[in-house]
Amino acid sequence: MKAIKIPELLAPAGGAEQLKAAVQNGADAVYMGGPLFNARIKAENFTEKNMKEAVDYAHERGVRVYVTVNTLLKDDELLKGFSYINFLYEAGADGVILQDMGLARLVRRYLPSMAMHLSTQATVYNWRGAVAAASMGFSRIVPARELTLHEIKGIVEKCHGIGGEGEDCQVEVFVHGAMCMCYSGQCQMSRALGGSGGRSGNRGLCAQPCRLPYEDKKGKKGYFLSPGDMCLLGHLRGLCEAGVDSLKIEGRMKSPQYVAVVTSIYRKYLDMWGEGRSLEPQEDDMKRLRQIFSRGGFTSGYIKGNPGPELLSGRSPKNSGIYAGSVKGTGKGSSLVDIEAEEKLSLGDGVEIINRETGEICGNVISYLKPVGKGIIRIGDIRGRISRGDPVYKVTDKALIKEAEASYRDDFRRKIPVNIRFTGKKGSPPILVMEEAEPEIPGKGKSVSVTGRLPVEKAERKPWDRENTEARLRKLGGTIFEGKNVEVDIDRDATAPVAVINEMRREAAERLAEKRKGSRRKGLTEEDINSIAEKEGLGREKIEAEEKGYAVYVYSRKAYTALRAGDLTEGRLTGRPLKEGETLKVFLPLEIYMEDDFQAVNSSLWKASETGRVEIIPYLLNITNGGLDRYLEENLERVADRVRSAGIAVGNPGWIDEFRERGVKVWGDYGLNVLNRQSEKAFEEMGVTVAAFSHDADWFYSGDIPLMITEHPLTRRRFKDRKGEGYTVMEWYEKDKYLIFRDGEKRKREPLGEGKRMIYMK
């Protein structure tokens, strides 16, 4: 009978306490960040010294460590980034999670033994993108959260068929925690709201604008862009059956108590899967998950398809906890509130009460509690506008917090089973062998052998007692080990001091624990790294806007129709006329380019293209998942024929090979997130000519860039933020993607500034 595959349980470790919480509650692996190039740079994180200690702590307990180096890097940061990964390699990290393809290129070429995992920030959303990532050296893919179970299964099937035995590319899927409104890696809203040099999510500084309140054109306020938290506990069977390799819990900014509760519950259900038991979530477990952190309950995300309005939390993006009852009454001028309770409330619990009319939230930690009637309790100290019938939520549960903390207080709670063999023969020193009883790779467990310092002697009075000897060998308290099988082979008339047995047991446990940490690996020397930097031009070679020439990026048919050749060639958009021999590129949606009358719609532009002064290039939306993927699969030959003379711009690696194999030139679009010369080289080696840099290169462009691209059907086409800044929603041509722009109707279009080369028009 084939053994049941149990996916890896991957838990977040935003700091040292979270690491302990994850490890002691059953994580198979943890992911953490350091001080450099980490998408959660505001978390506690780990210094280089702490990182080594964390790796040792995890490895000693059989837990793998993956380190996030998952931001985009600029040219002058690559050397520091590569040196840091060399340090992580030497420290024993089991892999690095990367977004930047330039950094990945360096790791693949010069540190090939370091496993690379492709971050969800790299926006892999179909099997073609996963296969492309594997060809670039990634051994694991973390696809976008927006995928259905069917789509995930398709990626797994392709990734598991890439290599030979044991060489499959693994697939890691988020199962619990926060969701973004935008496809990860494609969001510019945080950076744009801060102006030039704002807080970029791709640079580890997301300000979470999706968690802010907005106001629609009717004056209604709400959290229109704030998704609820994902919980796929009820979908574990489907993910396990699909062959997913790793199940990931989001939350490097969360508390250790959160990590403990969530990890322990998912560990419980994965163990149940391994035992062939039902995986139907128990209500008590779901309640614990909601209590420790949830935003208005949970969503299953896109696992069953687009959830529509159910995706949104609908409330403040803070923890909403669980519904605990409603207000029965309040004392006039008093801070005491009577509650008709539906959940147990205790002293020390945190509660919030929401005013049904105003939405105002008031609350506190319960400092006074008294039963005053059947099902009615009186609590205090609560201040604010409260009315009868207002809902009450328990946002913190003191007992749950204490229980969670107790689960990781003991560093030796998680035990490693070992087999012990003790041999004692007269005239020879005793020998104790301790070995892993359940090694990760059967037959390749670690073991140590300890020889006693004194020979075994013939007993003058009382000989050894086998049972007492076995009991002493099992005394492994204060270590990470527990005895599974203990064998004692001793001469019946022999003896040795008890202190010798205890000493041998302690030494064996210490040596095996040290051996489990793994030896430090030898990385590159400083001289090696300097040589690589010189060879690759790190810090010397840089992406240059001037190399790309001028370009106009068009989103809508309206903008395409309004565009005039003179605007381009005579300098009204570019700020200066085109020079002799200079060509300006116009990027046009493939959907428009494939229309029968696409040339007639703007004949002046096409006449200019015939002179060579303007080059018109069709592009694919960065996210083709869904309708556009289906269109391409059904019409690929026709599309390739139509675009062959111009080429096609792509913002995701997934379709690169399909077009190159058909003789179509492939241009690299901004969605590839090229922010350094090494990244540009990585795509050039795939046969791509990079035409546009990442939007994080804000020195490169002007105009209306998309701030978000989302699967969620945004029904409010216009809204504004707290500062009055307006936003417009564009529905893409296949009507299954939505783009958010700044409201361009209120903004004056300026020519390209000094040094800028691309202007965006919606």
Image: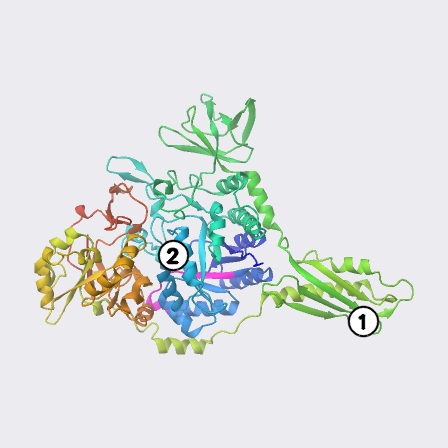
Range covered by the magenta-colored residues: 65-78
- In what element is the residue under mark 1? loop
Check residue 75 for magenta coloring: yes
The x, y position of residue 206, in whole percent, is 36, 52
Quadrant for the N terminus, please. bottom right
Residue 226 can be seen in this image: yes
Q: Hey, what amino acid is under mark 2?
A: Gly
Answer whether labels 2 and 1 touch (C-beta < 8 Å): no
Q: Which residue is labeled 1 in the image?
A: 454
Q: Hey, what amino acid is under mark 1?
A: Leu
The residue carrying pointer 2 sits among few (fewer than 14), some (14 to 19) or many (20 or more) residues within 10 Å by Cα, namely: some
* 756 relative position to 293: left or right: left
* 36 relative position to 308: left or right: right
Q: Quadrant of residue 389?
A: top left
Q: Which residue is labeled 2 in the image?
A: 204
The x, y position of residue 363, in whole percent, is 45, 33
Residue 40 can be seen in this image: no
- In what element is the residue under mark 2? loop
